[in-house]
């Protein structure tokens, strides 16, 4: 701003030296002052407009940030509902013992793919677990002589299923 004032003073000094007629000098100085005020008002108006636009942009940005935070919270809740329950073991896993047909439930968090066997609480026999369900049978099929439904199926091929069915038919006769 001081540079602007020094330039203004320099211009007035040059007018002072260039014009000898006092009446003309007075009119020129007044008109330069008027012109300067017009420019200053225009600059102030532009500054106000820019300041208002910046405030509007700031408010819109805050509004967008709030909306984004709400969306992020919703996504976090959905993610928590989907993934955290599995991680904290809120699911139960039902097992039917192939030795005594005892049905029991265990917490899924206790059942991980590293665990390959579990003890039946009724007959104390060890039940082998196979986490890779290779059986192509549908859940409703009677493939595997029902073992698929008891949780102890170690996977079978179609040939194994056919052999089990033939054995069952032979036993029925």
Image (spheres, helix red, strand yellow):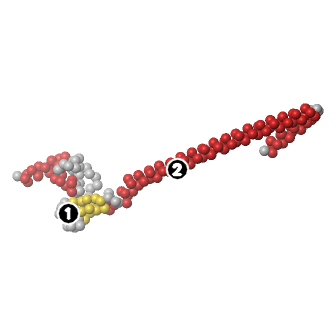
How many discs appear? 2
Q: Nearer the viewer, residue 126 or 69?
A: 69
Q: Nearer the viewer, residue 91 or 34?
A: 34
What residue lies at 21% left-to-right and 57% top-to-bottom?
Answer: 150
Distance between mark 1 and mark 2 Cα atoms: 54 Å
Q: Nearer the viewer, residue 35 or 82?
A: 35
Q: Residue 105's spot in the image, x, y percent?
A: 26, 62
Q: Residue 41's spot in the image, x, y percent?
A: 75, 39
Neighbor class of circle 2 (other Cα within 10 Å; few <14, some 14-19, many 20+) is few
Q: Is residue 18 visible?
A: no
Q: Is residue 27 above or below residue 62?
A: above
Q: Is residue 115 above or below residue 32?
A: below
Q: Earlier in the sequence, mark 1 or mark 2?
A: 2
Q: Nearer the viewer, mark 1 or mark 2?
A: 2
What residue lies at 81% left-to-right and 36% top-to-bottom?
Answer: 34
Q: Where on the picture, by quarter, is residue 95?
A: bottom left
Neighbor class of circle 1 (other Cα within 10 Å; few <14, some 14-19, many 20+) is some
Q: State if disc 2 and disc 1 touch (CB < 8 Å).
A: no
SS at circle 2 = helix
Query: Relative to 130, is 59 on the left or the right?
Result: right
Query: Relative to 123, is 89 on the left or the right?
Result: right
Reading the image, the residue beneath label 1 is: 102
Q: Residue 118's spot in the image, x, y percent?
A: 26, 63
Q: Residue 144's spot in the image, x, y percent?
A: 18, 52
SS at circle 1 = loop
Quadrant (top left, top right, bottom left, bottom right) of the N terminus: top right
What residue lies at 17% left-to-right and 54% top-to-bottom?
Answer: 146
Reading the image, the residue beneath label 2 is: 66
Q: Which mark is residue 94?
A: none
Query: Relative to 9, is 46 on the left or the right?
Result: left
Q: Where on the picture, by quarter, is residue 103?
A: bottom left
Q: Is residue 49 visible?
A: yes
């Amino acid at each position: 701003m001081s540079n602007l004032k020094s330039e203004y003073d320099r211009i007035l000094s040059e007018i002072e030296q260039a014009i000898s007629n006092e009446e003309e000098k007075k009119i020129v100085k007044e008109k330069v002052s008027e012109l300067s005020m017009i420019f200053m008002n225009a600059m102030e108006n532009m500054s106000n407009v820019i300041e208002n636009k910046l405030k509007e942009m700031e408010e819109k940005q805050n509004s967008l940030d709030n909306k984004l935070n709400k969306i992020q919270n919703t996504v976090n809740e959905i993610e928590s509902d989907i993934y955290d329950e599995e991680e904290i073991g809120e699911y139960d896993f039902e097992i039917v013992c192939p030795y005594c047909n005892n049905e029991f439930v265990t917490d899924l968090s206790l059942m991980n793919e590293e665990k390959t066997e579990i003890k039946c609480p009724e007959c104390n026999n060890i039940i082998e677990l196979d986490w890779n369900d290779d059986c192509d049978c549908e859940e409703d099929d009677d493939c595997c002589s029902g073992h698929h439904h008891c949780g102890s199926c170690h996977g079978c091929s179609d040939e194994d299923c056919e052999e089990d069915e033939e054995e069952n038919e032979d036993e029925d006769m």
